[in-house]
């Protein structure tokens, strides 16, 4: 049987379709709830897909026609996470922590702030000054001056987040754009936020963009440290 004190397990799923990865999450979520698996972090790059929640206005945020989706090689998939519409694809690091919030001294709000801080701390290692935006979940940066999807003035989203909590145990997580094809975000209104551009580490750093394995390594290191600090606090309080 798993223990609340078990160390995090990291599983790199490589590139995997959204449907199989979602089923893997659900199976692991149940195993963690049952005490049959330790807290686990799944890392994955998805095949090109647009995920849609069950919000009533979600259809208005899918702006591409079926023909345009086919031409771009992008599918759609319904999801049960929080949030709105988003895009996943190669070059985007998707991180799914599956853990019991109480074991780490967290509630939903503190968990979301921990995920945001993890991305802020990770990107700082690569020289990026990222931040939170009031009223908008995720991690943001000053919008780059490049043309295209990230060209609007103001701020641009670097990392999207959406989670679900089932019996105090997490599902879903974050999606950090590393070398993602940003043109595919033009098929949707990302996260349902009109006029808010999306960017990536490659667009921000150019040739200095770190390779995906390095981004994975740093993010896992930072996430593990942040979670373990919360777990230590929970033990001290208990």
Image (spheres, rainbow, N blue to C red):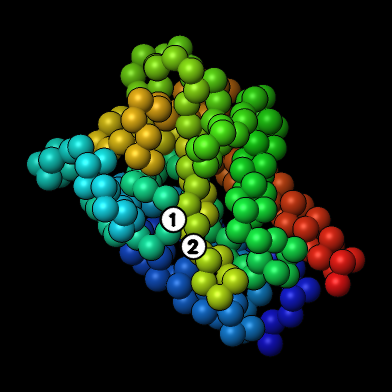
The residue at 73%/70% (across/down) is 103
| Residue lying at 26% horizontally and 47% vertically, measured from the top left | 57
Name the one closer to the observer, 99 or 44.
99
For label 1, the crowd category at 10 Å Cα-Cα, with few meaning under 14, some 14 to 19 and many 20 or more, is some
Point out residue 224 in the picture as x, y percentages from the top left corner.
72, 55
Q: Position of residue 62 (x, y in %)?
A: 23, 42
Horizontal side of residue 29 vs 148, given as left or right: right
Q: Secondary structure at mark 2?
A: strand
Q: Residue furthest bottom?
A: 1
Query: Decide: marks 1, 2 in contact (CB < 8 A)?
Result: yes
**Residue 100 position (above or below residue 151):** below
User: Which residue was labeled with disc 2?
Assistant: 164
Looking at marks 1 and 2 on the same chain, the residue that comes earlier in the sequence is marked by: 1
85 relative to 164, above or below: above
Q: What number is the disc on residue 82?
A: 1
Residue 108, by quadrant, is: bottom right
- Give me the residue at 64% from left, 47% from top: 113
Give the residue at x 47% y 26%: 156
Q: Position of residue 209 (x, y in %)?
A: 55, 27
Instruction: Report whether residue 181 is seen.
Output: no
**Residue extending furthest right?**
236
Residue 25 vs 205, above or below: the answer is: below
> Which image quarter is the N terminus in?
bottom right
As drawn, the label of residue 91 is: none
Location of residue 63 with respect to 126 vertically, above or below: below
- What distance separates the C-alpha of mark 1 from that of mark 2? 6 Å
* Local crowd size for mark 2, using a 10 Å CA cut-off: few (<14), some (14–19), many (≥20): some
Determine the secondary structure under disc 1. loop
């Amino acid at each position: 049987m798993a223990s609340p004190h078990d160390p995090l397990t990291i599983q790199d799923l490589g590139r995997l379709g959204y449907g199989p990865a979602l089923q893997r999450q659900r199976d692991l979520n149940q195993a963690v709830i049952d005490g049959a698996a330790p807290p686990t972090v799944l890392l994955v790059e998805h095949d090109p897909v647009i995920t849609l929640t069950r919000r009533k206005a979600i259809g208005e945020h899918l702006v591409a026609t079926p023909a345009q989706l086919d031409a771009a090689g992008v599918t759609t998939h319904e999801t049960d996470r929080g949030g709105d519409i988003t895009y996943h694809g190669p070059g985007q690091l998707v991180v799914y922590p599956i853990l019991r919030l109480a074991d780490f001294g967290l509630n939903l709000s503190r968990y979301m702030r921990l995920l945001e801080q993890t991305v802020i701390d990770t990107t700082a290692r690569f020289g990026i000054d990222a931040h939170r935006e009031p009223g908008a979940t995720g991690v943001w940066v000053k919008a780059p001056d490049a043309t295209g999807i990230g060209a609007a003035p103001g701020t641009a989203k670097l990392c999207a987040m959406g989670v679900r909590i089932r019996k105090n145990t997490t599902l879903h997580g974050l999606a950090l754009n590393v070398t993602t094809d940003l043109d595919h975000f033009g098929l949707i209104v990302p996260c349902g936020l009109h006029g808010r551009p999306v960017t990536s580490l490659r667009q921000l750093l150019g040739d200095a963009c770190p390779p995906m394995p390095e981004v994975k390594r740093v993010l896992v290191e930072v996430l593990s440290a942040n979670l373990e600090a919360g777990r230590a606090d929970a033990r001290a309080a208990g």
